């Protein structure tokens, strides 16, 4: 798919073309339901970077504070395989005794995206336990509601 055929770019180019056809930026913005400020940002982006600059860019930087340390994740997965009958709260309490601090919901968030890993590694935690620990509606990417 070329850049011009993407829906976001089509809308932005359509606005710029409409303004050029009408010769009136205010009227074009009113018809398209866009502010004039937005129009001028699109126009400047196209002038400086061409059509590729009109692509929607994610301006968010990842929040690294929300990432779980690899050592904690490894400890939770190892314990889940070692003691498959224990639930989230018990795993959290037992790991706390060993010096690894993770909340019960943290245990679930670590185990939930990896059902296949928990089932197959070292005999796994079993089908029934995997259903409890690993939500089926979670994809490996971690988004809820999407199937892998």
Image (cartoon, rainbow, N blue to C red):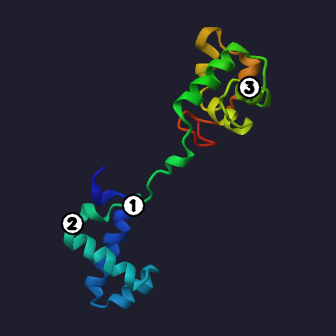
Quarter of the picture holding the C terminus: top right
Seen in the image, is 4 located left or right of residue 95?
left
Q: Which residue is mark 1?
A: 7
Could you say which is closer to the camera, residue 83 or residue 42? 83
Tell me which numbered mark, 3 or 1, is placed earlier along the sequence.
1
Image point (60%, 13%), residue name = 120
Q: Secondary structure at mark 1?
A: helix
Q: Secondary structure at mark 2?
A: loop
Q: Residue 28 bears which disc, if any?
A: none
Which mark's residue is nearer the viewer, 3 or 1?
Answer: 3
Query: Horizontal and vertical percent for residue 27?
Result: 38, 90
The picture quadrant where one finds residue 104 is top right
Could you say which is closer to the camera, residue 117 or residue 103? 103
Query: Horizontal and vertical percent for residue 140?
Result: 55, 33
Query: Horizontal and vertical percent for residue 109?
Result: 65, 36
Seen in the image, is 14 located left or right of residue 68?
left
Tell me if mark 3 has few (under 14), some (14-19) or many (20+) residues whose alpha carbon lies within 10 angstroms of its own. few
Tell me which numbered mark, 2 or 3, is placed earlier along the sequence.
2
Q: Which residue is mark 2?
A: 50
The picture quadrant where one finds residue 35 is bottom left
Q: Secondary structure at mark 3?
A: helix
Marks 2 & 3, CB-CB < 8 Å contact: no
Image point (27%, 77%), residue name = 43
- C-alpha gap between disc 2 and disc 3: 59 Å
Q: Vertically, is 89 above or below 143?
A: above
- C-alpha gap between disc 3 and disc 1: 54 Å
Query: Horizontal and vertical percent for residue 71?
Result: 55, 28
Image point (44%, 55%), residue name = 61
Q: Vertically, is 103 above or below 125?
A: below
């Amino acid at each position: 798919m070329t850049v011009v055929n993407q829906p976001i770019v089509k809308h932005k180019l359509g606005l710029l073309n409409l303004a050029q056809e009408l010769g009136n930026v205010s009227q074009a913005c009113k018809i398209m339901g866009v502010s004039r400020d937005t129009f001028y940002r699109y126009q400047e982006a196209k002038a400086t970077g061409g059509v590729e600059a009109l692509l929607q860019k994610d301006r968010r930087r990842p929040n690294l504070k929300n990432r779980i340390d690899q050592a904690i994740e490894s400890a939770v997965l190892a314990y889940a395989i070692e003691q498959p009958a224990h639930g989230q709260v018990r795993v959290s309490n037992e790991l706390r005794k060993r010096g690894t601090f993770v909340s019960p919901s943290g245990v679930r968030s670590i185990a939930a995206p990896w059902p296949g890993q928990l089932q197959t590694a070292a005999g796994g935690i079993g089908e029934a336990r995997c259903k409890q620990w690993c939500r089926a509606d979670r994809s490996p990417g971690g988004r809820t509601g999407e199937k892998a």
